[in-house]
Image: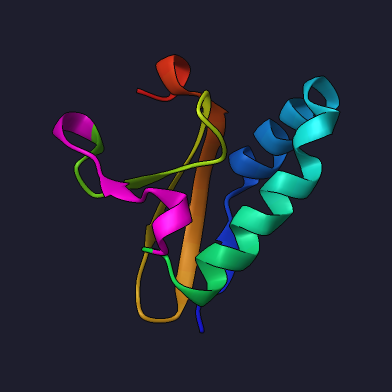
Amino acid sequence: MRKLAPTTSFVRDLDKFLIQHKDLSKTIEKVFRLLENDVKAAPLHTHKLHGKLLKLYACSINYKYRLIFEFDDEHIYLHYVGAHDDVY
């Protein structure tokens, strides 16, 4: 099982995001648990990004919001959380 490794900027973004979207805190916790167990779990809709974000992946928090990350054998490096249009 991989461990979550949030970047400093991710922690800052997540704090701001949760202040604005308190109703999504439990959903985000669920996404984190799913990521730790399997980064490609079906409910996450994980997909590889292209272009300047080539090394990164995105997964869905819900229809509107995404989580951007990369991973190796031991860690999941969390980079950004936000609206679909803002992330890309």
Residue 27 higher or lower than 31, as above or below: above
* Residue 45: x %, y % from top left: 38, 48
Asked if residue 15 is positioned above or below residue 30 in the image, the reply reads above
Which residue, as the protein is rendered here, is positioned at the far bottom? 1
Q: Which residues are magenta?
A: 41-52
Horizontal relation, residue 37 to residue 13: left or right: left
Residue under the image location 66 percent in, 32 percent down = 13
Q: How does the figure colour the protein chain or chains? A: rainbow
- Identity of the residue drawn at 28% across and 47% down: 47
Residue placed most toward the observer, 41 or 66? 41
- How many labels, in total? 0
Q: Is residue 10 magenta?
A: no
Where is residue 79? Give x, y as percent. 50, 44
**Residue 23, picture quadrant:** top right
Front in this rendered view, residue 82 or 63 = 63
**Residue 59 in the image: x percent, y percent?**
43, 45
- In the picture, measured across the screen, residue 12 lies left or right of residue 40, that is right
**Hey, which residue is sitting farthest left in the picture?**
51
The image shows residue 33 at horizontal and vertical percentages of 63, 66
Q: Quadrant of the C terminus?
A: top left
| Residue 49 covered by magenta stretch | yes
The residue depicted at 52 percent of the width and 76 percent of the height is: 37
| Outermost residue, front side | 43
| Residue furthest out toward the top | 85
12 up-or-down from 6: above or below: above
Of residues 62 and 73, the one nearer the viewer is: 62
Residue lying at 43% horizontally and 25% vertically, measured from the top left:
87
